[in-house]
Amino acid sequence: MSATEDLIAAADAHSAHTYHPLPVVIATADGAWMTDVEGRRYLDFLAGYSALNFGHGNRRLVDAARAQLERVTLTSRAFHHDRFGAFCERLAALCGMETVLPMNTGAEAVETAVKTARKWGYKVKGVPAEMAKIVVAGNNFHGRTTTVISFSTDPEARADFGPYTPGFQIVPYGDMTAMRSAVTENTVAVLLEPIQGEAGVLVPPAGYLAAVRELTRERNVLFVADEVQSGLGRTGRTFACEHEGVVPDVYVLGKALGGGIVPVSAVVSSREVLGVFRPGEHGSTFGGNPLACAVALEVIAMLESGEHQARAAELGEHLHRRLGELAGTGRVTAVRGRGLWAGVDVDPAHGTGREISERLLDRGVLVKDTHGSTLRIAPPLVIGEQDLDWGLDQLRAVLGA
């Protein structure tokens, strides 16, 4: 057996099979490239589902982490530490908000947003006890905790994990008629992904987010935007909501906030909304720890310059132009997305998404499928145009275009 086969066999023997990874074992990575245990290089077209927006081993982020590792890594929230205040202040300013509640993972942040909306509904809006409702969209992906899968429409995420948490109403994504009907006097929030990533990088109809924003203002309902995947530069703006000039009441952030080094997430909102919490009502031992804050502060500094957003916008135009040409061959039936983020529907006659991903692996490109014959393309924002073109050439070759 090869080193790759040995390591995969050991992983299969001793880990729960909650993922179906491609048969590659990564040993090192730099920028947009990864190298496996046998020395073969691969172009990363997934970027850790947007957690690696700034590339592998980004020197600014690694230096920030290393410096903090030498000082203090964890205090718990039982004590203050010297990076926490700056992190909260700078992240709130980046979002145009006032208050930050830090957590670790995206799913934790979504759970926190759900608790926040319910508490706000009872304490501020005056919804009767136990009657709060949150409206969500079909085909959503907000994580895999028990509460979150309770409002999933994906059978793989949901089956055999009940009983489910009540209090959610699901409407079709992009359907404002259904949204207006769903929002009632007991609705405390509308929770949406501005672009649905796991569903295949689905961009809502033009004007949809703005209409949701208007409706939620009219009905005194919180608009909660899950920008865990879409936020922090991926779409060519700091937040995907900006493409429609929308500012939600609550941002849910994660993935890229930790720079691909540590898990960092946060709920960001106004003092009125996050001010409903009192000590002891919510928290996290690792949330807002010194190491996380040090890395996230450097991420925020990189985003404050606007450089990465501009690069994602420019290269994104190039990406979508090339993919549009591929769609013209008939081998791709649809292309969606914004910035350096695309969902590519491959004609099933040319293979499933998994099969196409495996063929690309053989040609040195790492990408992942979702829902049948759809590929998600999301390279690090630091990728060079020549590398991007090379990766797209491999996709074209795999499809026989």
Image: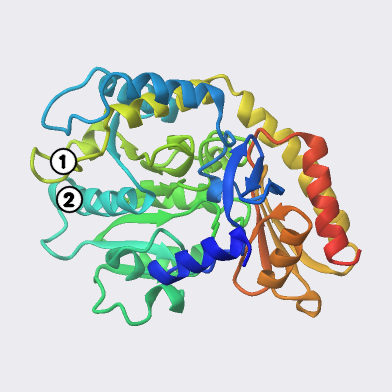
Give yes or no for contact between labels 2 and 1 (Cβ–Cβ under 8 Å): yes
Q: Which mark is residue 119?
A: 2
Q: CA distance from mark 2 to mark 1?
A: 7 Å
Q: What is the x, y in percent for residue 249?
A: 36, 41
Q: Quadrant of the C terminus?
A: bottom right
* Residue topped by disc 1: 276
Tag 1: residue type? Val
Left or right, 52 with reference to 273: right
Q: Is any atom of residue 93 visible in this view? A: no
**What residue is drawn where x is 53% and y is 69%?**
20
Q: What is the x, y in percent for residue 287?
A: 26, 38
Q: Residue furthest bottom?
A: 160
Q: Which mark is residue 233?
A: none
**What residue is drawn where x is 30% and y is 77%?**
161
Q: Residue furthest front?
A: 1
- Using the rendered view, name the quadrant where residue 279 is placed: top left
Q: Secondary structure at mark 1?
A: loop
Q: Quadrant of the N terminus?
A: bottom right
Q: Earlier in the sequence, mark 2 or mark 1?
A: 2
**What residue is drawn where x is 83% and y is 44%?**
389
Q: Is any atom of residue 208 visible in this view? A: yes
